Amino acid sequence: MIISIPISEISSYEKFDRSPNLKEKQFSGTFCQNVLKDVIKNGFINPLLVMPKNKHGKYRILIGHNRFLVAKYLKYESINCIVLDLKPSNPKAIKAAKAKYYTKTIVDP
C-alpha cells in the first residue's frame, strides 16, 4: 500500500545502502540533476521504498534516495512511500525486496 509520509519522518541513511556517506551527501551531481528535471516535468511516478520507523522515529529509505533528495530540494512536505515490514537485521530479505521492486518497476512501470 502506498502512503504519504512527511519528509521530516524519513531518513536517507541506512547501513545497507550502497553509499556509506549518503548521510552527508548534498544535492549535486548529474544524476540528481536529471532526476530533478524529470520530477519537474513528470512529477514523482514511483514511490520510495522504506522500512518502518526506527528507534529515532524515522522511516529508512531502501530505494529512492535521489528522489528523496529532490523532494527535499523542492521543499515537498511529504512524499509517497511503500513501507515494507522488514528488519535491518535481515539483509537477505532487504536484498530480495529491492530486487522485486526493481523488477516490478522495469516490467510494469
Image: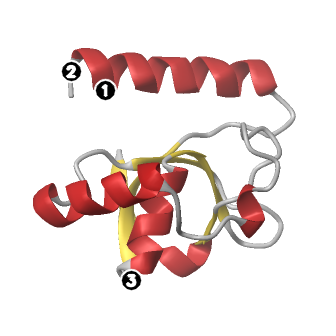
Mark 2 → mark 3, Cα distance in angstroms: 28 Å
Q: Which mark is residue 77?
A: 3
Asked which secondary structure carries label 2, the reply is loop
Type of amino acid under label 1 = Thr
- What percent of the width, then of the height, locates residue 57? 72, 72
Specify few, some or many for label 2: CA neighbours under 10 Å numbering under 14, 14-19, or 20 or more. Answer: few
- If the image is split into quadrants, where does the C terminus sit? top left
| Image mark count | 3
Residue 49 appears in the figure: yes
From this view, report whether residue 32 is shown above or below residue 55: above
Looking at marks 2 and 3 on the same chain, the residue that comes earlier in the sequence is marked by 3
Task: Identify the image quadrant of residue 15.
Answer: top right
Asked which secondary structure carries label 3, the reply is loop
Residue 82 appears in the figure: no
Type of amino acid under label 2 = Asp
Task: Identify the image quadrant of residue 71.
Answer: bottom left
Asked which secondary structure carries label 1, the reply is helix
Q: Which residue lies under the disc numbered 2?
A: 108
Mark 3 → mark 1, Cα distance in angstroms: 25 Å
From this view, report whether residue 81 is shown above or below residue 15: below
In the image, what residue occupies the spot 12% across and 60% down?
41
